[in-house]
């Protein structure tokens, strides 16, 4: 593992266990990061090939080093995970034949701990927050360019609730805000004292901006149905989420796949012709063990859900 990109994958034992029974073939690690999950899967299943996807070029370089011993069994691709179908085709793999897709969502501890990336209120750095620094709007552009009402809506939609309007009004008055320290300070001064006693008041604002900058929820909503569609029968899709917005999208996408989108009353037989495409591997979300949380605090909020593709008939 590259020492400049230390990476401990979350719930790795659970991920390996869920993929233990999938057919041999290709697993798409749609959030490759430092390659920890991919390495564990390749070691556990010599009959699997991993196609890794990530937006972050630093993560891809670290993953390439980590996975180099596996040779052609691992490939790394600079892309967004909502482009996973195109990545598969470009890599020579046919959709509908994939053994698994894995999403480990959110931001990595390495990204948070690098001040120059601008993800954390704990360090002073440029107000950036882009997972792919090569393009797209920065957090500074949103904070300094959006009208007050749009800024408040962004905070509400992506994590910050009742104080969103108050915070947005204060930030507009404070412009320009160009660094993480300046933003964290401005948010702290905008909220009443009781709010400052419940953890850092900028935490949800930073989360909301990061989600918006990277279109995280939009990309996830587009990627999850694609992930189920590219699976072969018996293939599994696994998603690890870290906040309620992500988990709601995962639950909704898996429910749609399991029900086929059926809208009939639950107590009555389906009359709308919906065709289920998947089954849940387990009901509800799995949580990390207490031992893992003690060892890796990032795992504390993790929720893992998984579904398995049903046999595909001539109509599926």
Image (tube, helix red, strand yellow):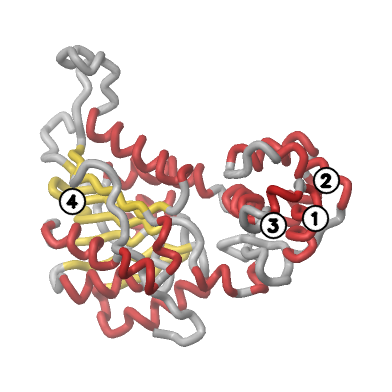
Earlier in the chain: of badge 1 and badge 3, it is 3
The answer to whether the residue labelled 4 contacts the one labelled 2, judged by CB atoms less than 8 Å apart, is no
What residue lies at 40% left-to-right and 52% top-to-bottom?
Answer: 241
Instruction: Report if the CB atoms under discs 2 and 1 are less than 8 Å apart.
Output: yes
Q: Which sits earlier in the primary sequence, circle 4 or circle 3?
A: 3
Residue furthest to the bottom in view is: 3
Give how far apart the Cα atoms at labels 4 and 2 are.
49 Å
| Nearest to N terminus: mark 4 or mark 2 | 2
Work out whether residue 20 can be spotted: yes
- The answer to whether residue 116 is left or right of residue 274 is right
Vertical arrangement, residue 110 with respect to residue 257, above or below: below
- Spatial CA span between label 2 and label 1: 7 Å
Q: Residue at x 76, y 47 (%)?
A: 191
Q: In the rendered structure, which disc, 1 or 4, sits on the residue that comes first in sequence?
A: 1
Q: Tell me the number on the disc at residue 170.
A: 2
x and y percent of residue 8 in the render? 38, 74
Who's the residue at 66% across and 50% down the image? 205
**Real-space CA distance between mark 2 and mark 3, rounded to the nearest whole angstrom:** 20 Å
Residue highlighted by disc 1: 186
Structural distance between the alpha carbons of marks 4 and 3: 37 Å
At 63% across and 38% down in the image, what residue appears?
161
Alpha carbon separation for disc pair 1 and 4:
48 Å
Mark before the other along the chain sequence, 2 or 3: 3
Question: x, y (%) of residue 229?
Answer: 27, 42
Q: Mark 4 points at which residue?
A: 235
Q: What element carries label 1?
A: helix
Q: Is residue 187 left or right of residue 83?
A: right
Q: In this view, does 300 lie above or below 149?
A: below
| Secondary element at tag 2 | helix
Query: Residue tagged by mark 3?
Result: 138
Question: For the residue carrying disc 1, how many other residues have a C-alpha within 10 Å: few (<14), some (14-19), or many (20+)?
Answer: some
Q: Where is residue 135 in the image (x, y as percent from the top left)?
A: 64, 60
């Amino acid at each position: 593992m590259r020492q400049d990109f230390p990476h401990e994958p979350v719930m790795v034992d659970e991920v390996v266990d869920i993929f233990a029974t999938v057919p041999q073939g290709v697993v798409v690690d749609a959030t490759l990061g430092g390659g920890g999950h991919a390495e564990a899967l390749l070691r556990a299943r010599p009959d699997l090939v991993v196609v890794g996807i990530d937006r972050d070029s630093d993560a891809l370089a670290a993953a390439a080093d980590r996975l180099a011993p596996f040779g052609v069994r691992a490939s790394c691709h600079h892309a967004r995970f909502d482009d996973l179908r195109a990545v598969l085709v470009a890599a020579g793999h046919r959709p509908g034949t994939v053994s698994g897709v894995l999403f480990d969502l959110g931001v990595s501890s390495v990204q948070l701990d690098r001040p120059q990336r601008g993800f954390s209120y704990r360090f002073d750095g440029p107000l950036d927050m882009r997972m792919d620094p090569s393009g797209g709007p920065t957090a500074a552009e949103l904070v300094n360019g959006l009208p007050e009402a749009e800024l408040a809506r962004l905070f509400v939609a992506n994590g910050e609730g009742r104080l969103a309007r108050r915070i947005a009004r204060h930030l507009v008055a404070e412009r320009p805000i160009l660094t993480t320290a300046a933003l964290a300070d401005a948010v702290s001064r905008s909220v009443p004292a009781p709010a400052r006693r419940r953890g850092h008041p900028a935490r949800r604002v930073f989360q909301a901006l990061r989600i918006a900058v990277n279109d995280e929820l939009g990309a996830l909503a587009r990627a999850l149905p694609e992930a189920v569609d590219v699976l072969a029968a018996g293939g599994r899709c696994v998603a690890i989420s870290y906040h309620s917005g992500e988990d709601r999208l995962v639950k909704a996408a898996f429910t749609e796949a399991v029900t086929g989108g059926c809208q009939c009353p639950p107590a009555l037989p389906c009359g709308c012709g919906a065709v289920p495409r998947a089954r849940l591997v387990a009901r509800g979300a799995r949580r990390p063990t207490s031992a893992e949380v003690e060892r890796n605090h990032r795992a504390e909020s993790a929720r893992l859900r998984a579904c398995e593709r049903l046999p595909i008939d001539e109509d599926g």
